[in-house]
Amino acid sequence: MTPQALASAPSRSNQSITLSFGLVNIPLSVYTGTEETRVARKEFFQGNPNVEVGRAAIRKDTGAVIETADVVRMAQADNGVWVPFTDDEAAACTSPRGLAEIVSFVKVKDAGKYLVENVKQVRPQRVKGKANPATEKAFALLTMALSTRKLMALVKVAMRGPARYALLDDKGNFFLIYTADAVRQELPLASFGNVSEQELNLANMLIDSVGIDAPTLLDTTAPVVKAYVNDKAAGVPVPERPVAESTPVDLMQQLLDSLAATQGKGQAS
């Protein structure tokens, strides 16, 4: 379950929680566990880089720009009435803010039953840069027990907004997960009963020619986009994008063409 990581380690925590395990309370700092690799973009007025466009709150009824201080976040009750509802209220009515209660332990092999939404890292909290030996030992004991028994801790925590669930592994990775009622059921797939054995064999040959692996993935599009932006800024002519042509589907021919192209690519490399 531990993600492959090549980005630099986080250096600053953005919030803190207290992991509750029976009578044990472990103060932890929470760090972001992901890194943005996409090319950053901003918006400018009529393409003028000296006039950046900000994000203004507007009234949807009139389109008038209003002050951020005048914006009140509200929630609608079942009877249709809207009431003010802050993040602190959302946390307070579901779980004490910052409390991360272990509600169960999950076998690592069963962790795939949960859909991960975000990844963070948790580490023993430091006060003025100094570690608390008791806190570090308590957390080390917990992670060692998780590793030995091949378990993950299922945690209910309120950080910002209402309480939610996360999985804590033996490396201190904190996987925020979706609850089952937030995951949509799968749309049905069309069933084809007229697939020939020859077509299926070609599909399997194509899979084998590509190869079966679990590679470490890098964002290969970000350098390409960055190079495109640099060329455009330097006045290099921008190549035209080819338009994919829509052609009738000949499954056998497409499989054969794909297989030939893949084998040719393998021989060239």
Image (cartoon, rainbow, N blue to C red):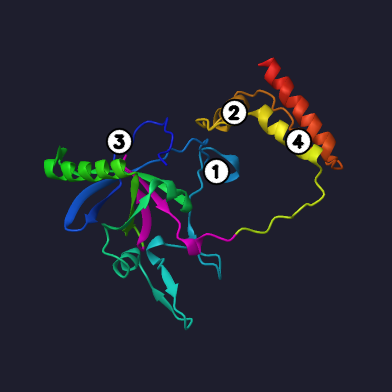
Q: CA distance from mark 4 to mark 3?
A: 51 Å
Q: Nearer the viewer, residue 29 or 233?
A: 29
In-image side of 248 versus 214 (left or right): right
Q: Quadrant of the C terminus?
A: top right
Q: Nearer the viewer, residue 154 or 131?
A: 154
Q: Residue at x 56, y 45 (%)?
A: 45
Q: CA distance from mark 3 to mark 2?
A: 28 Å
- Nearer the observer: mark 1 or 4; the answer is 4
Q: CA distance from mark 1 to mark 4?
A: 54 Å
Quick check: marks 2 and 4 in contact, CB under 8 Å?
no
Identify the disc placed on residue 224: 2
- Identity of the amino acid at label 4? Asn
Asked if residue 103 is positioned above or below residue 40 in the image, the reply reads below
Residue topped by disc 1: 44
Crowd class of label 2 (few under 14; some 14 to 19; many from 20; radius 10 Å) = few
Identify the disc placed on residue 201: 4
- Identity of the amino acid at label 1? Phe
Residue topped by disc 3: 11
Q: Is 165 part of what is drawn in magenta? A: yes
Question: Which range of residues does the magenta coloring cover?
Answer: 162-185
- Nearer the observer: mark 4 or 3; the answer is 4
Asked if residue 115 is positioned above or below residue 238 in the image, the reply reads below
In-image side of 228 versus 15 (left or right): right
Q: Which of the marked residues, 3 or 1, is nearer the chain's N terminus?
A: 3
Q: CA distance from mark 3 to mark 1?
A: 32 Å
Residue 144 appears anywhere in the view: yes
Quick check: marks 3 and 1 in contact, CB under 8 Å?
no
Q: Quadrant of the N terminus?
A: top left
